[in-house]
Amino acid sequence: MCGIVGYIGTKQAAPIILDGLAKLEYRGYDSAGMAIYDGEKINIQKSVGRLKVLENQTRGGETMPGMSGIGHTRWATHGAPSDTNAHPHFNESGTITVVHNGIIENYLQLRKKLTDKGYKFVSETDTEVLAHLLDYYYKGNPLEAVTKVLHRVEGSYALGIMFADCADQIFAARKDSPLIVGQNEDGCFIASDVPAILKYTRKVYYVDNQEVVRLRADHMHFYTVDEEEIKKEAVTIDWDANAAEKAGYEHFMLKEMYEQPKTVADTLNPRIKDNDIVIEELNMTDDDLKAIKKIHIVACGSAYHAGVTGKYVIEGLARIPVEVDLASEFRYRDPILEEGAMVVVISQSGETADTLAALRESKARGFKVLGIVNVVGSSIAREADNVMYTWAGPEIAVATTKAYSAQLIALYLLAMKLGKVRDKIDDETFAGLLGDLRCLPDQIELLLNNKLKIQKFANRYVGAKDVFFIGRGIDYAISLEGSLKLKEISYIHSEAYAAGELKHGTISLIEDGTLVAAVSTQPDLYAKTISNMVEVKARGAFVLAVTCEENKEIEKAADYVIYIPETNPYFANSLAIIPLQLFGYYVSVGKGCDVDKPRNLAKSVTVE
């Protein structure tokens, strides 16, 4: 969740590190710091709050000269946000310094052993253990010290390490927390995500689990934790560098919402060939797909909500039973995976800790895993047996929009492919579904261009205390995501319910003026949902309805109606979610919240 940037080369390191950390602000953080070697010693500067504080303290890096260094933005886990708990951490003499993403699970045992040996701790963090442990093992060979530490620690880590008496080197290491290294003609870089160094190089290497990298100004070497040198192939990042910038939009979230038509088209169009669905990177034959007897979808947050939609669509089109699990619950409930089951894990970053753990649990039990991910070369992309990419490009805002939309498209395509090869969809129906899919980008753009109506409505609910979202079937899945969008960026309490469940207790919370957003896109369920709307309106609720253009009957039960274009009911989520995203965004803007970086949240959750 935190950010790491490091540089060693022929340029001043501090400005490069600050620039890289700024590109990682979307990951969430509460403090920042840098360690720079000035030719004689390692200088450290740390501060609580936004990166701007550190920039001001160092005058943009000018007060910290030197051509090698490491930097960090911290999201507090062990110890409250403070200058002392901020990274980098260092040994008592200040000759070894480390930045760390992840959690050292056995840090208390290690801390006690080091304390017994005379080491003094000044912070509450687990990371300080690493600095003192490196000091304990360092006998002149930094690589040996690093690998010995890695053999002792348990948990997850992405590390950047500097030794003052080996100042021509920076070390990086990784286990279960994302880390990349890169190189250009001026030097070498480490980072926890691509945007941090995209300005400087497109040639990157993905560091695998339990690998160590020794970086010098002009080259780098890769090792196992047993100090055996290994060879790695570089990956060329083909992102447009401008994709990681705001491009004139007030917030990344708004920009990314407006990128959804392109995201949907980019995820969709390469997979439709000669009026058929071809998912080349899936690497599964028709016989492989026919052999699937059950699907387990495992994900977190918005990806889980996409999975809930996926359940309805796959079961409806392919007639394969589907279970959807929260990744944080999946491996702890001792799931029953029968012969013929396939596990599908969904993650934007491809590094989500709980989802990655579910993948490994499934593979350990001998089951095939399909990963639906956005980041090529991510841990899930590399460890899954098969992969399907969502071509959303970099997503910076913490609250996902375009990556979620791309995940929906991937699940639609997978459902249709499964249905076709299993003879559950006839040719005429299949052609109709393809036609509706092709219309989605233009329909999404139409909804985005009608944002003023949503903006005016959102302004009325800036002061709301509670909002409820209701729907049935796929509309329930849409409600889950609409509710999450509102609560995570506006801090308004919001809940989503299957509409028929509301009266089993929760309707007692409805009072005069309570906003209830009713999603109604499934024709077979229109009448049932309208009945639920009447129930809450009778108790004083103000009802916002999101429905299809044909459903004019809903106006009798709703106070305010937002219409979406007609599409196949299985694909309605892709359209109905757009006004709900806009609603959450404009409420958040109206409240003056930090839309792109909501409090307490991080973009990529790489710890349990």
Image: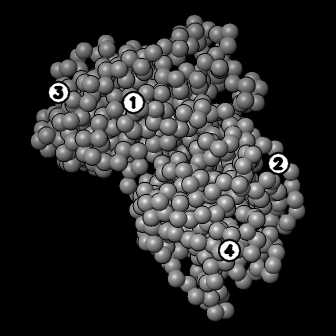
Q: Which residue is mark 4?
A: 40
Disc 1 marks a residue whose amino acid type is Ile
Is the C-beta separation of discs 3 and 4 under 8 Å?
A: no
Expressed as whole percent of the image width and height from the top left, the position of residue 49 reads 40, 62
**Element at label 3:** loop
Q: Nearer the viewer, mark 4 or mark 1?
A: 4
**Element at label 1:** helix
Residue 336 against residue 281 in the figure, above or below? below
Q: Which residue is mark 2?
A: 232
Residue placed most toward the observer, 598 or 14: 14
Please tell me which of labels 4 and 1 falls first in the chain: 4
Q: CA distance from mark 2 to mark 3?
A: 60 Å
Whether residue 498 can be seen here: no
Q: Nearer the viewer, mark 1 or mark 2?
A: 2
Location of residue 378 (image quadrant): top right
Q: Which residue is mark 1?
A: 577
Disc 2 marks a residue whose amino acid type is Lys
Q: Is residue 44 left or right of residue 583?
A: right
| Residue occupying the point 20% across, 20% down | 555
Residue placed most toward the observer, 199 or 87: 199
